[in-house]
Image (tube, helix red, strand yellow):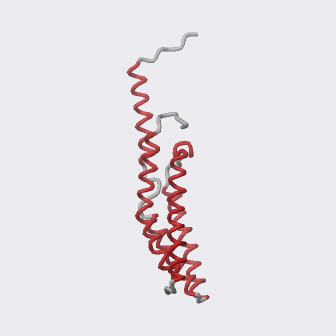
Amino acid sequence: MDTPRIPAVDAELALAEVQARRDQVVGANLVPGWFWPSIGGLMLLFVAAVESGRPAVVATGTVAYVLGLGALIIAMVRRSRVQVRTELIGVRGGLAIAGFTLVLVGVGIGLGLALDAAGAPAPATIACVPVAAGLALGGPALMAHLRRLMLSRPLGSVR
């Protein structure tokens, strides 16, 4: 049985279509811009509530954080049309996410401990401000970096 020959121009067009579809999926804003400052704001409010030490404020802040985080996650899941496979993000993408997380955690903990040692009032809340700002500003930058990484991968590649 002979396999049909596909004209080079048809193969080129098919490959261009696959590339365009991949670009469309990767180019979709998987994590919307409003997500990052929302997470940062919720985190800041939660830390301030806990640091207040007043049981009613801690309880209210905890419930508000849980409900707010749940609402953000539901909004993200409902909005998301695609799911990025780990093969597309690759090791470099995973390392970028881990690095972003570790930097923010390090800044928050380091600054919080330094402020506490210096006797600053509300050291955890103050230390959370640059972390929240880092989420709001760095989150979209991280997503742009991940998109560039995904688009730089050859089609069908598992590198």
* Viewer-nearest residue: 142 or 46: 142
Residue 59 sits above or below residue 157 on the image: below
Q: Residue at x 58, y 78 (%)?
A: 63
Q: Residue at x 45, y 18 (%)?
A: 6
Q: Quadrant of the C terminus?
A: top right
Q: Quadrant of the N terminus?
A: top right
Residue 115 sits above or below residue 5 on the image: below
Left of 129 or right of it: where is 52? right
Residue 65 sits above or below residue 98 on the image: below
Q: How many marks?
A: 0
* Viewer-nearest residue: 142 or 82: 142
Q: Write down the quadrant of residue 20 in the picture.
A: top left
Q: Residue at x 59, y 84 (%)?
A: 58
Q: Write down the quadrant of residue 59 in the picture.
A: bottom right
* Viewer-nearest residue: 110 or 17: 110
Q: Residue furthest top?
A: 1
* Viewer-nearest residue: 33 or 104: 104
Q: Position of residue 114 (x, y in %)?
A: 52, 78
Q: Residue at x 47, y 35 (%)?
A: 154
Q: Position of residue 126 (x, y in %)?
A: 47, 79
Q: Position of residue 28 (x, y in %)?
A: 43, 49
Q: Position of residue 66 (x, y in %)?
A: 58, 73
